[in-house]
Every structure is written in structure tokens, then in C-alpha cells.
């Protein structure tokens, strides 16, 4: 960066211009993330130009104060990750003053623990500094949460004090058990505990814990977490065990897992015994990858899944998704014919004529896109005369 202070001024101008356009933005979350990235770039430019750290801290806080759109809700925590040692110290002083002021005001009003945005920023600063003592000093005044336990554990782990880290994870899990609806701040305490157990040479305990989690909620995430703790010689046996358990659970989760694990045979056997109504009830995020995975080796089953994807859209009468419905219908046709099931395809064509003849936009697209296509025994797309009825 040849002129970092000039770059910092350009960042400031860019951020100001973004605010002028804020009312014209559809996706506020993505726009806010973009402005946050600009702010991080501004901090780096200021630091590269050896600008006054106190000025940087005061400007950041002024942006937070004047933020009417919520774009800088996470700026304090994100800034703590970017600031260098001098910048972090200056930022800490400014935030500490605001925290004390807010603390006195809240204490006068409630006399109890409270949640304060300045406290959250202070915690982020102390976590970057790996200062457990200061972090816990804040929690003594605001109350301790499972997320705080995870943060303290991470600091101890960074210092290689693994037993202390495990103790704080256990404390956070105990708090979750006592208050199951309390947020853990997005931290996977159980996963953190298993990682620490493995580092401490207690891999069997980690595996047992992962299996308990898998049995509760079998799925792709739980499968991948479990396999992290399975030795290579035992993987085949554990794979069979997990797939058998997942098959007894939620259908959507089992489909996801089969696709991820490339278990097309097992998936085909399951879906052969699944009703059309059940297939139509699954999200397209689940069934579309499954249909694609089955198309080559199990075209008959794939045809039913593609059919379900199409019918799900048609029954919902969402015309803006008719392009997707037509694509799924074309894939269903291809798979039916590949499996030698022309009669099933003809039956599906008749079903569309009978039950969806009022969907004029759909039929216009069918006639335009597929008119003239021929398939064995006349099993082409329904078009023209019969589709015009009732439009």
C-alpha cells in the first residue's frame, strides 16, 4: 500500500457514499456485511499509515453511535479482530468509559445483571488479548452465559491449558442443561468438549459422546462429527452402524446423508417404499440432489423423485417457479423412458392434463418448449388441444 492514509480517506468516502444509498438497498444484511468489510479495510489502512490509534478508536465509536440502519451492530467485535496492539488498547479505553457510564445507569434502574453492547465489545477485546481475568471481570457485572464459558475455554486452549479449558466447557454444558432455552451464542459446546477430550488422549469418550449426539439427531453434520473420532480400521463398521440408525430416523435427514455418503443403493431401496405424497412433502433442497444422484444407476426411482419435485411446485401454484417445474418434468420423462416405463410417463402426462389444465402459463411453456419432441409410443409432453381446455 503506497499511500495508506490516502487509502483510509477513500475508505471513509466509500462508507459515507454507501450510507447515502442505504434506503435503496434490498438486502440490508449483505450490504451491512460489505460496509463492515470496508471498515476493516479502513482500520488496516490507518494502521499501515501509523495514524493516531485514539483517533481510530473514536471514529469507530462515532460510526456505531450514528448508525441508524444497524450496519455496524457487529463493528466493535469485528474491529477487535483487526486492530493491532496499540489500536486495541486505545479502543479498550474508549469502550471501557462507555461501559462504566452505561453500567452506572443500568444499575440505578434495575440493580441487577444486564446486557450491554459495550460489555460485548469489551469481551471481544479481552478475548483477542487472551485476558481471562479481564473477561471474567466483565461477566461478574453482566452475568455468565454458556457463550462466555466457550470464550474463556478458547482462551485457555490457546494457552495450551487444556484441562482448564475442559473445565469451562463442562461448566457451560451444565448451564445449558439447567437452562435449555438459553443461547450458547452459536458455540458448539459439545463439539468443543470432544475436541478437547481427543487432545487430552481421551478419544473413546469423545467417540461415545459423538455417537450419543448422532442417535439423537442423525444427519450429515452428526455423521461427519462422529467420523472425526473413528479410527480408519473401524470406519466401515461405524458407517454401517450410523446408516442403519439414520434409516430409522427422519426421512429428509436420511436422504441427505445417503447423498453425502454416496449410498445410492440404500437410498434407492428406501425411496422405492416411500409414497409419492411423502416425496412431495420433502424440500427440493433434499430431493433434487437425491434425484440427480439416482438418475444414472436407478432411473426408475429417480423418475419418481423428479415427478415429486414437479408436482410439489404445480400443487403450490407458484407460477414463478414453473421453469423449475418444467426442468424437473423433463428429467422425469428422461428417467421414465431410460427405465422403459413409458406407461408411467403417459400416466403422468394425463395427470397434468386432468389436474392442472387451468395453469395456462405452464401449458404455454410446455407447448413452446416441447412441441415437436417425440418419444417412443407417443409418450411426449402433453400439449395443444387437451391443454387448452379451461384456460
Image (tube, rainbow, N blue to C red):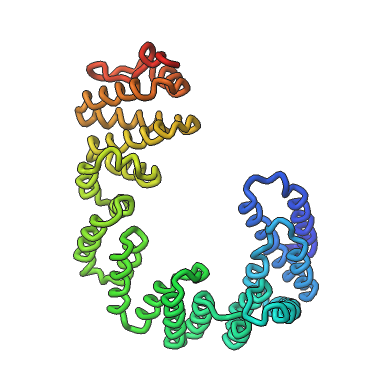
Nearer to me, 38 or 308: 308
Q: Is residue 306 left or right of residue 11?
A: left
Q: Is residue 107 left or right of residue 191?
A: right
Q: Residue 296's x, y, as percent?
A: 26, 38
* Residue plotted at (45% across, 19% down): 364
* Residue plotted at (70% across, 62% down): 39
Nearer to me, 185 or 377: 185
Q: Quadrant of the N terminus?
A: bottom right
Q: Is residue 117 left or right of residue 224?
A: right
Disc tally is 0
Q: Residue 203's x, y, as percent?
A: 30, 78
Nearer to me, 86 or 300: 300
Q: Residue 275's x, y, as percent?
A: 25, 40
Q: Quadrant of the C terminus?
A: top left
Q: Is residue 319 left or right of residue 127?
A: left
Q: Is residue 220 above or below residue 354?
A: below
Q: Is residue 50 above or below residue 303?
A: below
Quick one: which residue is furthest to the top in this view?
385
Nearer to me, 379 or 53: 379
Q: Residue 166's x, y, as percent?
A: 42, 83
* Residue plotted at (25% across, 51% down): 263
Amino acid at each position: 500500500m503506497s499511500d495508506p492514509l490516502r487509502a483510509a480517506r477513500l475508505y471513509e468516502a466509500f462508507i459515507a457514499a454507501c450510507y447515502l444509498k442505504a434506503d435503496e438497498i434490498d438486502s440490508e444484511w449483505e450490504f451491512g456485511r460489505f460496509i463492515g468489510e470496508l471498515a476493516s479495510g479502513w482500520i488496516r489502512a490507518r494502521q499501515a499509515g501509523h495514524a493516531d490509534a485514539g483517533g481510530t478508536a473514536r471514529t469507530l465509536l462515532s460510526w456505531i453511535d450514528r448508525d441508524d440502519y444497524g450496519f455496524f451492530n457487529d463493528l466493535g467485535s469485528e474491529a477487535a479482530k483487526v486492530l493491532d496492539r496499540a489500536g486495541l488498547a486505545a479502543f479498550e479505553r474508549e469502550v471501557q468509559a462507555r461501559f462504566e457510564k452505561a453500567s452506572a445507569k443500568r444499575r440505578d434502574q434495575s440493580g441487577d445483571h444486564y446486557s450491554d453492547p459495550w460489555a460485548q465489545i469489551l469481551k471481544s477485546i479481552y478475548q483477542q488479548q487472551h485476558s481471562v481475568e479481564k473477561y471474567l471481570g466483565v461477566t461478574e457485572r453482566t452475568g455468565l452465559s454458556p457463550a462466555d464459558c466457550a470464550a474463556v475455554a478458547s482462551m485457555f486452549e490457546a494457552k495450551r491449558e487444556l484441562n482448564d479449558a475442559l473445565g469451562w466447557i463442562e461448566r457451560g454444558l451444565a448451564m445449558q442443561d439447567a437452562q435449555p432455552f438459553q443461547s450458547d451464542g452459536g458455540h458448539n459446546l459439545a463439539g468443543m468438549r470432544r475436541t478437547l477430550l481427543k487432545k487430552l488422549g481421551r478419544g473413546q469418550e469423545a467417540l461415545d459422546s459423538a455417537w450419543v449426539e448422532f442417535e439423537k439427531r442423525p444427519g450429515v453434520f452428526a455423521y461427519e462429527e462422529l467420523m472425526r473420532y473413528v479410527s480408519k480400521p473401524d470406519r466401515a463398521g461405524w458407517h454401517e452402524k450410523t446408516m442403519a440408525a439414520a434409516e430409522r430416523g427422519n426421512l429428509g435427514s436420511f436422504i441427505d446423508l445417503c447423498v453425502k455418503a454416496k449410498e445410492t443403493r440404500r437410498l434407492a431401496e428406501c425411496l422405492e417404499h416411500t409414497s409419492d405424497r411423502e416425496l412431495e412433502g420433502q424440500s427440493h433442497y433434499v430431493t433434487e440432489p437425491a434425484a440427480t444422484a439416482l438418475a444414472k444407476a436407478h432411473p426408475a426411482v429417480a423418475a419418481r423423485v423428479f415427478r415429486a419435485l414437479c408436482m410439489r411446485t404445480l400443487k403450490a401454484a407458484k407460477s414463478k417457479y414453473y421453469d423449475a417445474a418444467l426442468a424437473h418434468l423433463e428429467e422425469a420423462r428422461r428417467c421414465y423412458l431410460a427405465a422403459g416405463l413409458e406407461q408411467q410417463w403417459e400416466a403422468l402426462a394425463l395427470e397434468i392434463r386432468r389436474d392442472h389444465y387451468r395453469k395456462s402459463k405452464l401449458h404455454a411453456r410446455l407447448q413452446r418448449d416441447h412441441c415437436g419432441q417425440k418419444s417412443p409410443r407417443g409418450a411426449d409432453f402433453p400439449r395443444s388441444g387437451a391443454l387448452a381446455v379451461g384456460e
